[in-house]
Image: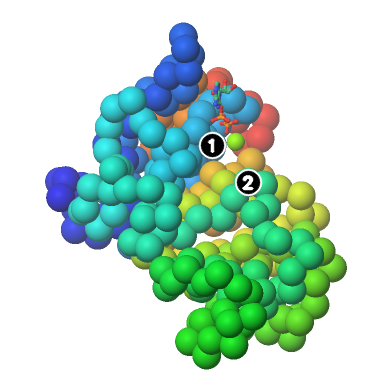
Amino acid sequence: MGDAGKDTVLATRGISKAFGALQASDAISLDLKAGEIHAVIGPNGAGKSTLIAQICGTLAPDAGQVELNGEDITALSARGRARKGLGRTFQISALAMEDTVLQNAVLGAQGAMGTLWRFWQPALKNKALLARADEALARVGLEELRNIRTSELSHGQRRQLEVAVALTLRPKAFVMDEPMAGLGAEGSQRLTQFLAELKQEAPILLVEHDMDAVFALADRISVLVYGRVIATGSVEQIRANKDVRDAYLGDAT
Ligand code: ADP
Ligand code: MG
């Protein structure tokens, strides 16, 4: 375990990744502590999604490590990391739109339990899977909608369902890439409120463009520019930081 403290749940240590001549991640070291929302912000192309992909295991870093509760998980696949308790929601929805809300949640629970089912039907009849899926749906307030087709959900409800799918893993940490994307003002507000509660269950590393949401939610903010963390601090510290204002925030403050 690193020296970042025993309340560190998730950490990157010197994560680096180049695409040809482009240094998309430049020795990124971040930590996520119990109970917090740590937001990662930065301009388009700064390397936020690339960082998330390396944390979640869909992209291998050139150098550096990812640790979950002090354990080096860098060698694990995305699925292996999920089973260890890394809960992810995607920038682009990974839901099966033609399936029902419940089916999507059960699929998540299935992945969590590590059982390979060949057919859909047995999974839906499996009581343990169903219980876990229903528990997650209730947690995000979608239990009433469990039998409708996912394509009929609003954007905001789909985001909630994505969180429910992640919750079926009983995650130790959440990693979210732009969960507010595509939501209207009301949807963003609702999700903001929900994430503020969710962080008590598991801390959230949050990549987000919506600065209102970030300023409302973040316990700490890190600013990524050209693959490098140029500042980490509280909302107040980041808003007052001259380098950050020059590089990114501009008038947003
Ligand atoms: P952000 O999420 O902050 O907008 P990204 O992580 O998506 O930024 O991209 C960071 C940089 O890496 C961008 O310049 C992007 O074009 C580049 N990039 C991302 N993925 C790849 C890839 N698979 N191959 C080549 N370049 C990539
Ligand atoms: Mg991105």
Relative vertical location of residue 51 with respect to residue 107 in this rendering, above or below = above
Quadrant of the rendered structure where residue 149 is? bottom right
Does the residue tagged 1 have its C-beta within 8 Å of any atom of ligand 2? Answer: yes
Helix, strand or loop at mark 2: loop
**Residue 191 in view here:** no
Mark number displayed over residue 49: 1
Q: What residue did someone put label 2 on?
A: 91
Relative vertical location of residue 102 with respect to residue 3 in this rendering, above or below = below
Residue 68 as seen in the image, left or right of residue 157: left
Residue 149 as seen in the image, left or right of residue 165: right
Name the spot of residue 101 as percent of width and height, x first. Answer: 71, 74
Residue type highlighted by circle 1: Ser
Q: Which residue lies furthest to the front in this view?
A: 118
Q: Which residue lies furthest to the right in this view?
A: 152
Residue at the (69%, 66%) spot, across then down: 190
**Residue 118 in view here:** yes
